[in-house]
């Protein structure tokens, strides 16, 4: 057996004072003997990677429904990109990279099939019954729905990873509130970094997919200052390069520009507010992981462009409405005839709300599984 890791000495040496140290964790809900040479956050990261909900992200929509093409981002590739960006930022700020990565990899486990349109449909269907929030659903996944261990439900993750999941917030995500996760406190800086990494990944990789799909064009993007500044420099340096390579270079430069700005802004705030500990972070009135005012100004037109030209494009709207229709139809059939559910799902209904069990079942589906279920239930020539 390898020698037990001396995490206090190691982490005190390599991490900043305001980083979350694994030996200061508030622990797990169910007591466990910890690993000999992996910290609690390393184990959390590994538990997420090996869980079924993480694997299912491969066939869940980001913007484009899975069968639209193999090139487009899925919820899994998005999650991996968020983790990569977040790791880079955490390393530069001397934060706990393992905690950062665990939160990043878990932040979308509760997402529905068909992206945010699926979430909107389930929230509407669950109105008056607790609603649906994918952050809270991610917490349900790791606390209850995953079944891998004999001694407890879920993955039994640490308090800090669970806090990062439920307090995740971005342009698309509203932070949840859970009474045992200090709802009035700011999350760790590691969790805040994941939020921003999520936005960086969303914006830049949706640009990539939008151009590839033909829904937006590079000439249109030249109207945006943040895009045009980078495009001009790259086009002058590589005037005869393939447009696909030029696009890649621009997206790469955009990510680097925003990551660099964020790191510098956080460093400046840490110095300005004299932040020396995790508790200093948690007691702040506002998050300190933000872009500079200049970067916020540059990003604003980009966000507006994506909303108007991509997310509200008639093809994306059509995909969204079709997705909502699939989910609503499945939900009604399952609610009206729960005996038609698979046996292992019927077993979960005993002593529990039928609506919530059905909601959990649908939320866990991949795009293609939901489409297959729809065909089985509504196509007269499809085998059930």
Image (cartoon, rainbow, N blue to C red):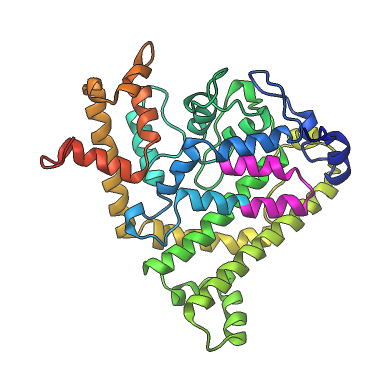
Q: Position of residue 378 (x, y in %)?
A: 16, 38
Of the 4 image quadrants, the one containing the C terminus is top left
Can you say whether 125 is above or below 311 in the image? above
**Residue occupying the point 34% across, 23% down:** 345
User: 347 or 378, which is in the foreground?
Assistant: 347
Corner quadrant of residue 286: top right
Q: Position of residue 348 (x, y in %)?
A: 38, 18
Residue 325 visible in the snapshot: no
Instruction: Give left or right: position of 314 versus 155.
Output: left
Q: Position of residue 310 (x, y in %)?
A: 40, 60
User: 16 or 295, which is in the foreground?
Assistant: 16
Corner quadrant of residue 44: top right
**Residue occupying the point 77% across, 32% down:** 1
Q: Which residues are magenta?
A: 84-106
Residue 100 visible in the snapshot: yes
- Residue 96 within the magenta-colored segment of the rendering: yes
Query: Which SS does the magenta portion mostly show?
Result: helix
Can you say whether 92 is above or below 366 in the image? below
Q: Position of residue 70 (x, y in %)?
A: 39, 60
Residue lying at the far bottom in this picture: please name it.
240
Instruction: Give left or right: position of 184 versus 328.
Output: right
Residue lying at the far left in this picture: please name it.
380
**Residue occupying the point 83% across, 34% down:** 3
- Residue 319 within the magenta-colored segment of the rendering: no
């Amino acid at each position: 057996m390898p020698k037990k890791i001396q995490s206090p000495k190691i982490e005190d040496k390599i991490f900043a004072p305001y980083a979350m140290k694994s030996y200061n964790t508030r622990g797990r809900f169910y007591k466990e003997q910890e690993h000999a040479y992996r910290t609690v956050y390393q184990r959390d990261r590994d538990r997420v990677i090996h869980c079924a909900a993480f694997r299912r992200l491969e066939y869940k929509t980001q913007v484009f429904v899975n069968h639209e093409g193999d090139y487009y981002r899925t919820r899994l590739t998005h999650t991996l990109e968020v983790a990569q960006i977040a790791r880079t930022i955490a390393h530069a700020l001397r934060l706990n990279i393992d905690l950062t990565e665990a939160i990043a990899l878990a932040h979308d486990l509760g997402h529905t099939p068909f992206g945010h349109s699926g979430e909107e449909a389930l929230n509407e269907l669950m109105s008056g019954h607790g609603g649906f929030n994918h952050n809270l659903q991610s917490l349900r996944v790791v606390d209850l729905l995953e079944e891998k261990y004999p001694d407890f439900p879920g993955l039994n993750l640490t308090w800090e990873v669970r806090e990062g999941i439920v307090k995740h917030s971005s342009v698309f995500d509203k932070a949840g509130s859970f009474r045992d996760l200090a709802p009035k406190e700011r999350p760790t800086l590691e969790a805040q970094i994941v939020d921003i990494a999520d936005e960086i990944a969303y914006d830049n990789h949706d640009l990539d997919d939008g151009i590839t799909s033909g829904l937006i064009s590079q000439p249109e993007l030249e109207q945006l200052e943040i895009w045009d500044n980078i495009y001009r420099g790259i086009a002058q340096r590589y005037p005869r390069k393939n447009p696909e390579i030029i696009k890649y270079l621009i997206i790469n430069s955009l990510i680097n520009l925003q990551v660099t700005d964020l790191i510098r802004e956080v460093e400046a705030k840490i110095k300005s507010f004299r932040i020396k500990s995790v508790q200093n972070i948690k007691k702040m009135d506002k998050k300190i992981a933000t872009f500079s005012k200049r970067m916020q100004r540059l990003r604003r037109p980009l966000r507006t462009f994506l909303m108007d030209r991509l997310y509200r494009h008639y093809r994306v709207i059509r995909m969204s409405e079709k997705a909502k229709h699939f989910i609503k139809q499945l939900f009604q059939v399952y609610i009206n005839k729960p005996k038609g559910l698979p046996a292992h799902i019927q077993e979960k209904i005993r002593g529990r709300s039928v609506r919530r069990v059905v909601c959990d079942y649908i939320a866990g589906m991949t795009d293609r599984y939901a489409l297959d279920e729809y065909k089985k239930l509504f196509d007269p020539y499809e085998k059930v």
